[in-house]
């Protein structure tokens, strides 16, 4: 079992007066994800930088960690990420 780490930037946009997930982008490193999330949050309502660790072969999620949040992020985002 090989664990693969992926760094993501999740954007949040407003639709029908609600904050909802928008596009998701990958970043090569943890610091890259944080920088990208912070920069994107200047143009859109909010972003979160996330580290996802999953089994490379099965895709089974090992863990998901929020590295940073910028701007407006839904209150229940951390709960939903944990599953």
Image (cartoon, helix red, strand yellow):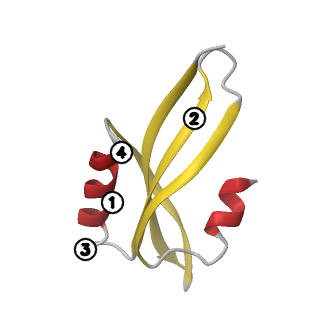
Q: Residue at x 66, y 25 (%)?
A: 59
Measured in 3D between alpha carbons, the distance from the residue under mark 2 to the one under mark 4, in whole angstroms, is 12 Å
Q: Which mark is residue 76?
A: none
Instruction: Give the x, y percent position of residue 70.
Output: 38, 72
Q: Earlier in the sequence, mark 3 or mark 4?
A: 4
78 w.r.t. 35: above or below: below
> Which callout, 2 or 4, points at the residue further toward the start of the chain?
4
| Circle 1 crowding by C-alpha within 10 Å: few under 14, some 14–19, many from 20 | many
Q: How many marks?
A: 4
Q: Secondary structure at mark 2?
A: strand
Which element is circle 3 on? loop
Whichever of callouts 2 and 1 sits on the residue coming sooner in the sequence is 1
Task: Find residue 37 and name its label.
Answer: 1
Whether residue 43 sits left or right of residue 79 in the image: it is left
Q: Residue at coordinates 71% horizontally, 65% vertically from top-left?
A: 79
Q: CA distance from mark 3 to mark 2?
A: 28 Å
Q: Look at the numbered discs 1 and 3 and tell me whether their residues touch, using CB distance below 8 Å.
A: no
Residues marked 3 and 2 touching at CB (< 8 Å): no
Q: Are marks 3 and 4 in contact (CB under 8 Å)?
A: no
Q: CA distance from mark 1 to mark 4?
A: 11 Å
Give the residue displayed 51% in from the left and 74% down from the top. Answer: 73
- Residue where numbered disc 4 is placed: 30
Report the front residue among 56 and 23: 56
Density class for disc 4 (Cα within 10 Å; few <14, some 14-19, many ≥20) is some
The residue identified by callout 2 is 53
Q: Secondary structure at mark 1?
A: helix
Q: Which residue is mark 3?
A: 42
* Distance from Cα at disc 3 to Cα at disc 4: 19 Å
Callout in the foreground (2, 1): 2
């Amino acid at each position: 079992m090989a664990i693969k780490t992926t760094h993501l930037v999740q954007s949040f946009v407003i639709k029908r007066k609600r904050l909802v997930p928008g596009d998701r982008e990958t970043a090569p490193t943890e610091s890259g994800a944080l920088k990208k999330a912070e920069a994107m949050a200047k143009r859109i309502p909010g972003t979160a930088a996330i580290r996802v660790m999953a089994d490379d072969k099965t895709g089974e999620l090992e863990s998901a960690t929020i590295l940073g949040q910028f701007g407006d992020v839904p209150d229940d985002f951390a709960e939903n990420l944990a599953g």
